[in-house]
Image: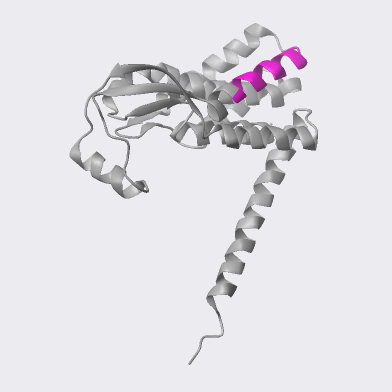
Amino acid sequence: MRSSFSVYQFLFLLFIVVMVAVVIQVGVFTMALDKLGLSPHSAMLLLICTLAGSAINLPLFSMRAEEPPAEVKQMMRSLLFGRPLPFTGKTVVAINVGGALIPVSFSIYLTTVNQLPLLQVILAVTLVAVICYSFSRPIPGLGIGIPVFIAPFSAALVALLLAPGQSAPLAYICGTLGVLVGADLMRMRDIRKLGAPVASIGGAGTFDGIFFTGIIAVLLT
């Protein structure tokens, strides 16, 4: 007996679900950037550049690192398609375009356009960075991980307390830069213990944190 629910119907429904999810996420993203004063076209351009840039890591330097445990190697093989990069005793430290360079550039733009006091921005970023550092943990073989909602809620609260009238831009700035500083730069000494061939500032696990922190933090203000 032939099933009335074919594979093609299943694939079509899956496609619809994925498209709806994408539309919702894009809508939320543009809504958040609208609060920052960007037009829909500018918001879409920033979204595309951020996502495309997340695949680009620019090498900075390399350092000696400890070899990951055998169970971590096995886990990496099961999580990654194809063969993972071989560990050669060194970790290449790189910077991610979509997860670091673009958020930093956009934060500088927001600071300038909204004429935010520099000391206020530094204080907000410092507070969020300390919180992110406290909750972030090194994950052997992968990178630095941080719970998803810690940074955006912290950034929104700090922005509302320090600058209620300009909470949206300050929330984005201290959220994104706070993750970069607290979960990446302040964790540089832990890179040697990761046993990862490449450690990307703003990449891997922290990209999701940086990407969603800016969006959620702005929506919460």
Q: Picture quarter containing residue 105? A: top right
* Residue sitting nearer the eye, 186 or 7: 7
Q: What stretch is highlighted in magenta?
A: 102-115
Image location of residue 54, percent across then percent down? 54, 33
Q: Is residue 47 found left or right of 149 in the rendered image?
A: right
Image location of residue 18, percent across then percent down? 60, 57
- Magenta span: predominant SS is helix
Image location of residue 120, percent across then percent down? 64, 11
Based on the picture, tell me whether residue 208 belongs to the magenta stretch: no
Based on the picture, tell me whether residue 110 belongs to the magenta stretch: yes
x 67%, y 24%: residue: 160
Residue 73 vs 124, above or below: the answer is below
* Residue sitting nearer the eye, 136 or 188: 188
Residue 20 vs 82, above or below: the answer is below
x 60%, y 20%: residue: 104
Q: How is the image coloured?
A: one colour
